[in-house]
Amino acid sequence: MLSRRTFLFTSAAAAAAPRELRCDVAVIGGGTGGVAAALAALRNGMRVVMTEETDWLGGQLTSQMVPPDEHPWVEQFGGTRLYREYRNQVRSYYRDHYPLTAEARARWNLNPGDGSVSRITHEPHVSAAVLDAMLARYVSSGQLTVLRDTMPARADVAADRVRAVTVRHKSGLEKVIGAAYFIDATEQGDLLPLAGVEFVTGFEAQRETKEPHAPAEAQPANIQAFTVCFAVDYAAGEDHTIDKPAEYAFWRDYVPALKPAWPGKLLSWRMTDPVKLTPREVIFDPTAEANPPGKSNLFIYRRIANKRNFIPGAYASDVSLINWPQNDYWLGNLHGNSPAEAARHLARGKQLSLSLLYWMQTGAPRPDGGQGWKGLRLRGDLAGTEDGLAKYPYIRESRRIRAEFTVLEQHVAAAERKEAEVFADSVGVGSYRIDLHPSSGGDNYIDVGSLPFQIPLGALIPRRVENVLAGAKNLGVTHITNGCYRLHPVEWNIGEAAGAVASEAVKTGHAPRHIRNRKELLGALQVRLVAQGVELSWPRAGAR
C-alpha cells in the first residue's frame, strides 16, 4: 500500500520511509506536463507517485521561470479545463494575497505583469504555490506521494515492460518505485535511456521525415538552445552591479557563428528577426511603462510584476524575467553528453546569463545616450536560489520517443495546408508557431507558421515498450514540430492526456497501444476525456 504522506526526502522523512513504493501510475518528472499527468491520474482514482528534480513542482512554469507562452484564444478554448483552472487560480492567488489596486482586482483577465508575451505573466513562486494547492488534497489523503529533489537513476526492465524505477535524492538516498504504468515527464526524457525506450535527439534527416526544413543528413547533436533565466527589478539611483563574471570577456566579445548570420555581437540590442532572418533592433529601458511606437522594449516583454497593478509602495519597481536571445546558450547540449560535459555547458550557460546582466548594468547602450543601468537588481528571492538564477535551465528540446505516430512539419505547417491534419486518435489540442531558437548545430532561427493542431495518442506511445508513456516534450514529434508542441498549454495537455490514458489502461487492463488501435476502446477513452474537460478538436476557423 502507498504511504499516506508526501516524502520530501528530508533526513527524518527519508529514514522513516519504506525503500519501495507501490502505485498505479508513477510520474517521473514533476514539471508542467508531470503535474498535469498526476492530476489526471488522481482524478481517475489512481494511486500516484511523482518525482521532481528540483524542490518546486511546475517545470517551465516555476523552476525554469518562464511565464506561460500561449495562443490568442486560450481564455476561451484551445486548452484543457484543468489548465484554465490553474490559470484562474493564479489570478485568485493574487487577489487573495497581494495588495492589488481596485482596478486590477476587478479585471477578470488580470495580468499581474502585463508582459507583452502572455496574458498572465506572473512571479514563478505563485505558480509553485498554486500547483501545490491543486495537489494538496491528494497528498493529505495519501493518494499521492511526491518525491522532490529526486531523479531517476535506474530501471528494472523485463521484455517490453518496466517493472520498477529506482530514483535517487540529491542526498544520495534511493527509493524503488513499482507501478503498472510509468509516465516520463522529465525535462529531457531522462527515463527513456534508463528504460530502454527507443528515442531520437536533434534533427532528423529529410529522407526520413520528408519535412521541407529538415537537413539532408540526420544531426542528432543539433539541439535547440537552453536558457538560464533570471529576474531583475530596477532601483534608480542605487548600484546593484554584480561581480564581474569569470567569462565576461568571452561573452562580451562573442559573435555567433550561425547560418544565416547573426548581425554582430550576441550582447547587443541588435539581433536576428526570427521570421525574416534580418537584423532587428530592440531597446531596453526599465523605467518605461509601455513600448515606444514601432519598438520592442525587452524589459516589458516578460515583465512579471507591473507595479501599477498594486497599491503605491507595494513594489519599488516593475520586475522583468530575462529570457531573451541574448542569453540563449547553444555552444553545447545538456543531454547526449557525459554528466561532466553537461555540467560544463550548464555552468557556461549560467556565465552567459550573469554576463548579460553585468553588461546591462555596466555597458549596455541606453535610450538616453548613457551606458549601463547600475540599478538593475538580481532577484534571487523570486527564483528561490542563492545565485539569483533559475533553479533549472529552460529546456526547449528533449529526447523524443520513437512513437507509434510522429507528428511532422507537413501535418501542421501553414505553408503545407489550409488546416492541420485531423487525427482520429486525438487526445488534445494546441497552437503555436513552429518556433525553433538557434541550435547547437549552428542553425539560426527556424520560425514557420503553423495551424491549430491536435495531439494524437499515437505520439504518446513508444513503438515497443508497453507501459511507458510520454508526458511532456518527449512525445513523438520531430526537431521541427517540437517547436510548436513544446509550450506551456500544450505540454500540460500532453501530460494530462498521458495521465488519463494510463488510468484507462489500469482500469480496463488494455495497454495504451491496444486502446489506440481498437475503435471501441479509443472511443470510450475520448468520451471520458471530453467529460473531464479535454478538448479533442478545434472550432471551425470562422469561429476562432
Image (cartoon, grey):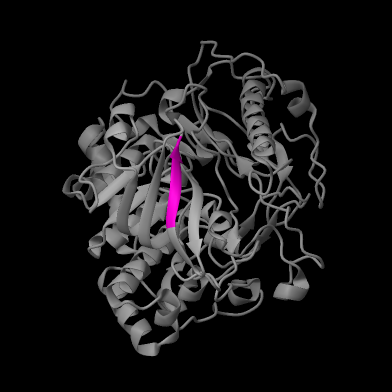
Nearer to the camera, 312 or 189:
189
Vertically, is 141 above or below 526? above
The answer to whether residue 98 is visible is: yes
Magenta-colored span: 164-169
**Quadrant of the image for the N terminus?**
bottom left
x, y percentage for residue 261?
Answer: 82, 47
The residue closer to the viewer here, 71 or 24, is: 24
Examine the image and state in which quarter residue 53 appears.
top left
Q: Main secondary structure of the magenta part?
A: strand
Q: Residue furthest top?
A: 238
Which residue is rendered at x = 31% and y = 73% of the image?
Answer: 504
For the question of whether residue 107 can be seen, the reply is no
Q: Position of residue 233 (x, y in %)?
A: 48, 24
Based on the picture, tell me whether residue 405 belongs to the magenta stretch.
no
307 in relation to 84, above or below: above
Task: Tell me which residue sits at (62%, 43%) in the image.
Answer: 226
- Name the residue nearer the viewer: 50 or 88: 50
Q: Is residue 351 left or right of residue 181?
A: right
Eyeballing the image, is 528 above or below 398?
below
